[in-house]
Amino acid sequence: MTNPIKLTIQPINSLISRDSRPFGRGQGTRIRSLDWLTPSVVCGSLRSSLGKSVGAFDAAKLKTVKIRGPFLECEGSLYFPRPLDFVTDKKAKNGNDISGYVIRPGDLKSGEAMEMPIELKPAFIQNLPDEDFKPEHIPAFWSADAMSRWLAGDAGFSLKPSEYLEGPAKDERVHVGINPETGTSEDSLLFSTTGLDFRVKRDGKEDWKEILQMTVAIEAEPPEDYREALEKNLSPLHVLGGERRLAEWRRSENINGWTPHRISNITRLRMVLATPAIFSQGWLPGWIDKDNKQGTIPIPGTSVTVKLVSAVVGRWVPISGWSYEAQEHGPKPLRRMVPAGSVYFFEAQGGQPFDSAFLESVWLRSVCDKEQDQNDGFGAALWGAW
């Protein structure tokens, strides 16, 4: 697509991205939210808005609208989930600057043993000063510039306060069911919700200023009628997430982070998930043969075949939902997502080095196995050296 359409989403209320635990009569009285919205929540809202804009809901066509995101946006820059191959402790912090240690594939020492799910190298924290290591909290989101430096292998890497954010805070609310006839509360209908509050305080001021937003890009050429709606007639206000809370949608341009940093002549490649991924082999991409650790199918969208060396993968995250399609109406099956920030280490096969042209072809593209998961925004990946 020559001119990708980018949309900025400004939540008006706190937003809920359900964590798949049951809620409703006889099931549960609390709605809990994940720490960030899943791609399918944003994608579903966008497709619903497009259907309303053109006055027709063609499910087959709408499901071909392919997004990248959602990503956190703040003051004109994208922010990505922190990579799991970076750790820190009190000794590595310098005021508000955050330095730390890298996690990289390594070899076991003589006499050591480790059970691995497949034959891979274990990943170790490098250059620890001593054995008394206690990991410290790391901010949840890094700016595009900071992430580019990290992926380029900056030896003296550190995070400045302007380069990280904690992301939306959790907003807890208590609700009560109201009898429409009497206008009074219903017995046994007290429940609570937890949402994501996109308001943050800046410079120690007590007043709230809404500066956190989300952004998505339409990756592939959408059907013509829906493209016109995206460019001209998209409803500026539309519900998003659980409890049908409102968000403002608008066109945006010139956001830093959509284009990759530059690399040249590297043969070891690092893949960091920028959105959660769904793979056919659990934590392992389906295009990796788990028996011989080599990509029998190239990296999606390329002709490049790689060998998996190691991985740093977070705990799986559940995802479910509700389908409104006529043929599949009802609850969706529970699936397991590989969390954003998970890191995979590869080596090139055939002696072919990676360069900036390769990086351009895969930057923030989906690495999921199924086409619909790719269309829905899962598995967007960042790439760099190690």
Image (cartoon, helix red, strand yellow):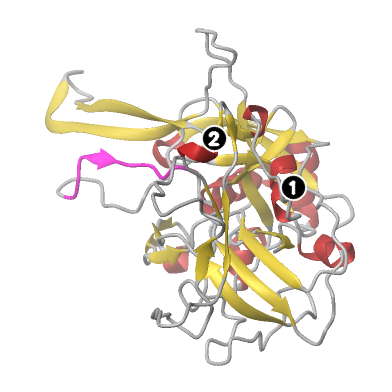
- The label on residue 149 is 1
Whether 210 is drawn above or below 262: the answer is above
Q: Is residue 63 visible?
A: no
Q: Is residue 32 magenta?
A: yes
Expressed as whole percent of the image width and height from the top left, the position of residue 221 reads 80, 59
Task: Please give the range of residues in magenta.
Answer: 27-36
Q: Quadrant of the N terminus?
A: bottom right
Mark 2 element type: strand
Main structural element of the magenta stretch: helix, strand or loop?
Answer: loop
Whether 346 is drawn above or below 87: the answer is below
Please tell me which of labels 1 and 2 falls first in the chain: 2
Q: Residue at x 41, y 54 (%)?
A: 131
Q: Is residue 53 visible?
A: yes
**Relative side of 5 to 183, left or right:** right
What is the residue that sits farthest to the bottom in this orientation? Answer: 291
Tag 2 residue: 93
Q: Quadrant of the C terminus?
A: bottom right
- Callout 1 amino acid: Arg
Q: Nearer the viewer, mark 1 or mark 2?
A: 2
Q: Residue at x 87, y 62 (%)?
A: 356
Q: Is residue 255 magenta?
A: no
